[in-house]
Amino acid sequence: MPPTADATITAEIVRNALVVAAEEASIVVVRSSHSTNIQEGADAAAALLDARGRLVAQSAATSVMHSASLRCGLQSLLEHVPTSAMRPGDVYALNDPYLGGIHANDIMVLNPVFAEGAVRWFGGTLIHVADMGGTTAGGLGALATDTFAEWVLLPPVRLYREGERNADVFAIIERNSRAPSKVIGDVQALVAGTHVVRRRMEELVDRYGATELARQVDAYIAYAARRFHEELAHIPAGSYHGTFTIDSDGVTPDRALDVVVTVTVSRDEVGIDFTGTSAQSAGPINASFSQALSGVVYAIRCFIDPSIPMNEGCFASIRAVLPEGSLVNPRPPAACGGRVVTVAAAVEAILDALSQAMPDHAVAASALIHVYTLSGSRPDAGPWLTLGYEFGGIGARAGCDGPDATGAYFLGGRSVIPQLEPLEVQLPFVAERCVLVPDSGGPGTWRGGLGVEVALRMTAPAELTVRGDRILLPPRGVQGGLPGRPGFFAVERADGRREDLAARQQHVMLAPGDVFVIRTSGGGGLGPPGARSADAVRDDVAEGRVTPGGAERDYGVDVRATAAQPAEQS
């Protein structure tokens, strides 16, 4: 029997209320945070989950990478602490990648929501906090070889017990941070966000009752599962194979690191099997199970209707095989701080496989996030640090050029890239340039997106750490398209010398007047460059995306000769 109009309206109201609860929590975390990158990049994840460990709703700024971690982290919490042992006012935290976390600097906070005397739901928040110790500032252990170099891992611990702050846990976090006031402020912001979810759910219980609200949650998840399952029917059944090769782990020279996947699509489910993927790395690029799963879900969602809500229903029709001891499911204590490298490679491998099933959805490889930390101490203001990042070009896709300097895949935040002006006000550097790089997008019938170059001149001494990928092996093109131009890190010294940095390098000392340069890679092209419209090439030149020399070299279009021709008389 179809639902009545009133029932349909109620369901829609409740579903939007669930999402708004998560959205409001995310905003509260950003506004309450103490870290510059969170304040300016609005990079804070928030979600509503239930007592069965299911993802119910997430905020718009929450990436699949973070919601998968909150989901898996809650499931680990429930294994360690049964709901019967929880009390109103308890608040929990964890950051262990082997218990559903991401890496040491990403702390998640989980707050149980009680109704009718029992835990029914959880508010969850997660951010990359200011600093949690380890070998380098800001949690960017570019050359870490185990989790011990990435700071202390928190199993599920109580931050608050029945509303009372657990001073011992806060003291441990504070004592191990280079920026203690910022990190404690960030943790308190996370807690504040979860309180918002709890209050909003309590209001909904008052309005609808716990039983009816639980029924609405179940129906919401079932709705997403049904739509997800229906969308899979549009992907031709069969088995498809994909691969992607990672630059390096920064630690083991000349080691090939491959993510290999077999995607099997049937009427009932999609299987993602990573058998054949390289063994876990000595460096920090390993992806724990929650992170590998996030890449799987994201990649599949690229081939289905994006309006399907992101909740537990999106996990129901996916069966992932993550071989233990591999890059996508390492054994502890393998370092996981640079897990985005492997997660993004898993996404590329799945896209490669499913592009065979749906060629009109083919996409070239994209640049990967280029990350850095700068830290130091000023006599007048004490220690300072910032985590920064820049994005490169997205790969071209069938029928469309790749976007320029855009965050690929599952990397979140509302603003994504912080504005430079607020950073200059708070930190001892001046931005000398922030420009798109012409000719960096991979040539093709459809051109890859451009990378960006940013140069920061230091006004005080600083220590620099960098981590990038798809630099030695730039983003590949597909179907005859060419790769994007690789990026780099460099330091232009005040005395005129230039030092090129490795893709992963730590403890680079900068003096006042030194300029740190970060250039990101361009996305790969799709289709033969010679098949690109000459008019499109001329437009690229006019807009500064392609140089006249690049137009001739890569596309065979002489824009100078064209410009010299007299206009045709009518």
Image (spheres, helix red, strand yellow):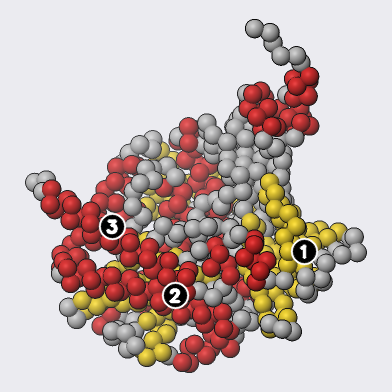
Q: Residues within 10 Å of mark 1 (few under 14, many from 20)?
A: many
Percent x, y of residue 293: 45, 58
Q: What residue is at 53 percent from the left and 88 percent from the top?
A: 172
Q: Amino acid at mark 3?
A: Asn
Q: Is residue 549 left or right of residue 568?
A: right
Q: Say which of 418 and 341 sits in front.
A: 418
- What element does badge 1 sit on? strand
Percent x, y of residue 522: 66, 45
Q: Amino acid at mark 2?
A: Leu
Image vertical order of residue 112 relative to residue 315, above or below: below
Q: Quadrant of residue 179?
A: bottom right
- What element does badge 3 sit on? helix
Q: Which residue does the numbered mark 2 point to in the structure image?
A: 190
Q: Which residue does the numbered mark 3 point to in the structure image?
A: 16
Q: Is residue 417 left or right of residue 100?
A: right
Q: Residues within 10 Å of mark 3 (few under 14, many from 20)?
A: few
Percent x, y of residue 402: 58, 40
- What element does badge 2 sit on? helix
Label ID, residue 457: 1
Q: Residue furthest top?
A: 570
Q: Residue furthest left?
A: 1
Q: Quadrant of residue 51?
A: bottom left
Q: What residue is at 54 percent from the left and 62 percent from the top?
A: 41
Q: CA distance from mark 3 to mark 1?
A: 46 Å
Image vertical order of residue 481 relative to residue 522, above or below: above
Q: What residue is at 75 percent from the left and 35 percent from the top?
A: 547
Q: Amino acid at mark 1?
A: Arg
Q: Earlier in the sequence, mark 2 or mark 3?
A: 3
Image vertical order of residue 559 relative to residue 255, above or below: above
Q: Residue furthest front?
A: 570
In the rendered image, is residue 101 in sight? no
Percent x, y of residue 338: 60, 64
